[in-house]
């Protein structure tokens, strides 16, 4: 599991991390770093231009996680419900790039946005 840019692995699964899993989690790290940087920039701009408190910067690390949760909730609303997590745009990008050895060439900021159309209803 990737939280922000750290990969968290239970000790008993440490030896079972394949290159495919590592690429998958690397894509998630890139997505989360992108969302974190954008959230940080928005927080700084709001702090400089409005009465937004500088303490709001402390919430910036939660922005990538919030984006995942919001995306997941949207997918829960749309059937089939048992595939909600698998159908979020972040997972779609990670799954499509996990088997590609040159995946870094295909990663760019917000590339996960092209996976937003809901394939359950013919969007992809």
Image (cartoon, grey):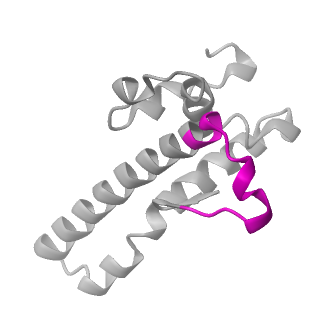
Q: Residue at x 65, y 57 (%)?
A: 1
Quarter of the image with the C terminus in it: top right
Q: Is residue 105 above or below residue 69?
A: above
Quarter where residue 7 is shown: bottom right
Q: Is residue 92 above or below residue 13?
A: above
- Single out the residue that lies furthest toward the left: 48
Q: Residue at x 80, y 63 (%)?
A: 12
**Is residue 111 inside the magenta stretch?**
no
Question: Could you say where residue 20 lies in the image, as x and y percent from the top left?
Answer: 63, 33
Q: Is residue 63 left or right of residue 95?
A: left
Q: Nearer the viewer, residue 8 or 119?
A: 8
Q: Is residue 98 left or right of residue 122?
A: left
Q: Nearer the viewer, residue 99 or 30?
A: 99
Question: Could you say where residue 27 lies in the image, as x and y percent from the top left?
Answer: 49, 40
Q: Is residue 115 left or right of residue 48?
A: right
The rendered magenta stretch, by its main secondary structure, is classed as helix
- Single out the residue that lies furthest toward the front: 15
Over which residues does the magenta segment extend? Answer: 7-22
Q: Is residue 77 left or right of residue 104?
A: right
Q: Residue at x 86, y 32 (%)?
A: 80
Quarter where residue 61 is shown: bottom left
Question: Could you say where residue 21 lies in the image, as x and y percent from the top left?
Answer: 64, 40
Question: Could you say where residue 104 lies in the image, as x and y percent from the top left?
Answer: 38, 30
Q: Is residue 2 above or below residue 28?
A: below
Q: Residue at x 68, y 20 (%)?
A: 119
């Amino acid at each position: 599991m990737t939280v922000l840019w750290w990969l968290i692995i239970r000790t008993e699964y440490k030896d079972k991390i394949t290159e495919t899993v590592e690429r998958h989690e690397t894509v998630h790290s890139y997505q989360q770093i992108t969302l974190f940087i954008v959230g940080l920039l928005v927080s700084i701009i709001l702090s400089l231009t409005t009465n937004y408190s500088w303490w709001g910067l402390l919430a910036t690390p939660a922005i990538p996680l919030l984006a995942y949760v919001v995306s997941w909730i949207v997918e829960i609303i749309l059937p089939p419900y048992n595939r909600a997590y698998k159908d979020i745009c972040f997972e779609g990008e990670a799954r499509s790039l996990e088997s590609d050895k040159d995946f870094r060439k295909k990663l760019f900021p917000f590339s996960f946005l092209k996976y937003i159309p809901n394939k359950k209803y013919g969007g992809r």
